[in-house]
Amino acid sequence: MAAIHTTGSMSDSPSLIWTISSGSMDGVREPGEQQATTTYSDTTRAVSGTSGSLKSFPLDTGAMSQNQDNTDSRKRVTFQGDEGGNAIAEETIGIETTGQPGANDTWPACSNTVSAGSSVHLIQGSVATQAQTRNVGTSPALNYRFSLFGL
């Protein structure tokens, strides 16, 4: 867990791109090869106020069952602006899966992309998000939760 508490200005912008493949990831999809990519970006900027940010981002590259996730980002940003102060918090998460059928497969080539996110402009308040993906193990999944609170 990372925590930031500032008075004045604050900027934070973590990101992740994670690709896995059943093949060699050399840019050429071989018969039967499947790939999955998770992308995540988060930008928080605050000016002229008191800011607080809590962030956790566990990543597990192992195979997950139906109720488990490979990524599980949790973030909470609180801002109390001074005169003219504001905070902008933006977050996006996405998952893309592609597959090339093998010689004896009956399923077609596939490409699926799903993304979610939020953008909020605060003068005074708090926002909490949770962004989860699963792309190893059972069916791929993406969940996104967003809550906004007053101070």
Image (tube, grey):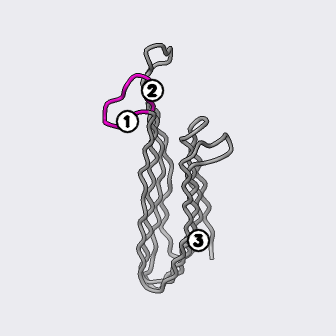
Q: Which mark lies nearer to you, 3 or 1? A: 1
Secondary-structure class at tag 1: loop
Amino acid at circle 2: Cys
| x then y, percent, for residue 90 | 46, 61
Kindly identify the residue that appears in the image at 56 percent across and 74 percent down: 78
Q: Is residue 113 left or right of residue 28?
A: right
Q: Looking at the image, is 11 positioned above or below residue 93? A: below
Rendered image: mark on residue 24: 1
Gap in angstroms between the C-alphas marked 3 and 2:
40 Å
Pointer 3 or 1: first along the chain? 1
Amino acid at circle 1: Ser
Q: Nearer the viewer, residue 50 or 58?
A: 58
The residue labelled by disc 2 is 110
Rendered image: mark on residue 126: 3
Residue contact at pointers 2 and 1, CB within 8 angstroms = no
User: Residue 63's quadrant in the figure?
Assistant: top right
Q: Looking at the image, is 122 positioned above or below residue 135? A: below
| x then y, percent, for residue 79 | 53, 77
The number of numbered discs placed on residues in the rendered structure image is: 3
Secondary-structure class at tag 3: strand
Pointer 3 or 2: first along the chain? 2
Gap in angstroms between the C-alphas marked 3 and 1:
44 Å
Residue contact at pointers 3 and 1, CB within 8 angstroms = no
Gap in angstroms between the C-alphas marked 2 and 1:
18 Å
